[in-house]
């Protein structure tokens, strides 16, 4: 039994019970040599002769899947599967699993932290103070502001609960919204258009698919409130980055906080890096001790369950 493991927080030096469990189960484990998400050409030689794949944010294309004959399961270390060709995997009889809810608290914490950083210009004030300046900037409070959530799954729900505790008005759109949960926690269901146009802070918690690609574009940005803020801790392809840059540079939007980008990592000359009202983090939403343990536990259990029984409740491509 040979397994490829590519998440960077699940490397050879990681100390966690799920890793020990996988070591007991597998005869051989191959680790990610690049310490970043792998391209299809990098994956192909590593997946040769592998029975299982515990996958990070790697590009698992049809070309990759056609290169392997033994692979039976791709166990995603996280929830998003937009970089996995699910149809190609299904055609080859390869199950794909994920870890729903495992990193919800971690990503929600980062989302709220980014909102606070935008509201009070914390990174800019930190840099200025360290450079010897004593320059105050008048910010805004979260209380009484409207937070709009596009996506109301596990992460959207946890973000909403934190925002309500800060006294924010929370509205949300999701095509499959849990109305009873929303009512219980003081969240008002709205249409997608209402969430975009009524929010002081707009936070994205959507999967990346054809229907959500560039959901934040020039047209939707034009409908946003002047001075509104955009936060993306989901997937970079949800935002038309050129349109966002234009709106931030013109002052139509007050700022943006990004943990995900269309190309990761962005080039050093990435235009949004140049704007003072943009906060950037390196796709680190799920990187907490607790979330890493949760994702590792679920991902390992999913992989072993499929290998041993041929089934798992977290299969996403039946």
Image (cartoon, rainbow, N blue to C red):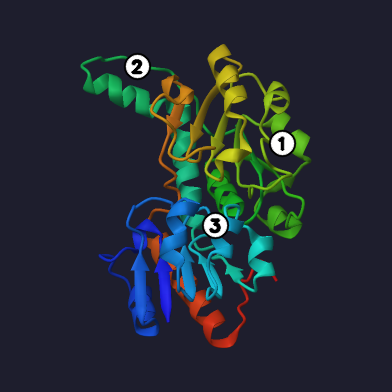
Quadrant that contains the C terminus = bottom right
Quote the CA–CA distance across marks 3 and 2. 47 Å
**Of label 3 and label 2, which has the lower sequence position?**
3
Quote the CA–CA distance across marks 1 and 2. 32 Å
What residue is shown at x 43% (from left), y 18% (from top)?
138
Residue 179 sits in quarter: bottom right
Q: Nearer the viewer, mark 1 or mark 2?
A: 1
Residue that badge 1 annotates: 195
What residue is shown at x 65% (from left), y 70% (from top)?
92
Residue 273: x and y, percent?
43, 25
Instruction: Check disc 2 and report its element: helix, strand or loop.
Output: loop
Q: Is residue 141 above or below residue 51?
A: above
Q: Nearer the viewer, mark 3 or mark 2?
A: 3
Q: Is residue 206 above or below residue 254?
A: below
Residue that badge 2 annotates: 136
Residue that badge 3 annotates: 60
**Of label 3 and label 1, which has the lower sequence position?**
3
Residue 100 appears in the picture as rendered:
no
What residue is shown at x 35% (from left), y 68% (from top)?
30
Instruction: Say if mark 1 contacts mark 2, CB within 8 Å.
Output: no
Instruction: Say if mark 3 contacts mark 1, CB within 8 Å.
Output: no
Q: Is residue 41 above or below residue 300?
A: above
Of 298 and 58, nearer the camera is: 58
Classify mark 1: residues with Cα within 10 Å, few (<14), some (14-19) or many (20+). many
Instruction: Check disc 1 and report its element: helix, strand or loop.
Output: helix
Classify mark 3: residues with Cα within 10 Å, few (<14), some (14-19) or many (20+). many
Direction from residue 81 to residue 190 in the image, left or right: right
Of 230 and 299, nearer the camera is: 299
């Amino acid at each position: 039994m040979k397994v490829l493991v590519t998440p960077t927080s699940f490397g050879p030096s990681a100390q966690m019970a799920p890793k020990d469990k996988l070591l007991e189960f597998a005869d051989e484990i191959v680790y990610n040599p690049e310490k970043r998400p792998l391209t299809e050409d990098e994956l192909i030689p590593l997946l040769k002769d592998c029975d299982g794949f515990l996958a990070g944010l790697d590009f698992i294309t049809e070309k990759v899947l056609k290169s392997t004959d033994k692979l039976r399961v791709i166990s995603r270390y996280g929830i998003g599967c937009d970089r996995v060709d699910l149809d190609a995997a299904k055609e080859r009889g390869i199950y794909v699993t994920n870890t729903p809810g495992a990193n919800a608290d971690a990503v929600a914490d980062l989302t709220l932290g980014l909102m606070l950083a935008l509201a009070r210009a914390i990174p800019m004030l930190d840099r200025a103070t360290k450079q010897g300046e004593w320059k105050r900037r008048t910010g805004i409070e979260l209380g009484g502001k409207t937070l709009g959530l596009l996506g109301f799954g596990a992460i959207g729900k946890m973000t909403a609960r934190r925002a309500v505790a800060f006294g924010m008005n929370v509205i949300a759109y999701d095509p499959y919204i849990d109305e009873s949960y929303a009512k219980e926690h003081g969240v008002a269901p709205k249409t997608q258009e209402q969430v975009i146009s009524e929010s002081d802070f707009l936070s994205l918690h959507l999967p990346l698919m054809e229907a959500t690609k560039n959901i934040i574009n020039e047209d939707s940005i034009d409908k946003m409130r002047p001075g509104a803020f955009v936060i993306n801790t989901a997937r970079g392809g949800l935002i038309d980055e050129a349109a966002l840059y234009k709106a931030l540079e013109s002052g139509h939007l007050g700022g943006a906080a990004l943990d995900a980008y269309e190309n990761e990592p962005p080039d050093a000359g990435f235009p949004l890096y140049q704007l003072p009202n943009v906060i950037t983090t390196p796709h680190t939403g799920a990187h907490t001790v607790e979330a890493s343990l949760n994702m590792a536990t679920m991902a390992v259990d999913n992989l072993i369950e499929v290998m041993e029984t041929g089934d798992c409740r977290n299969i996403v491509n039946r």
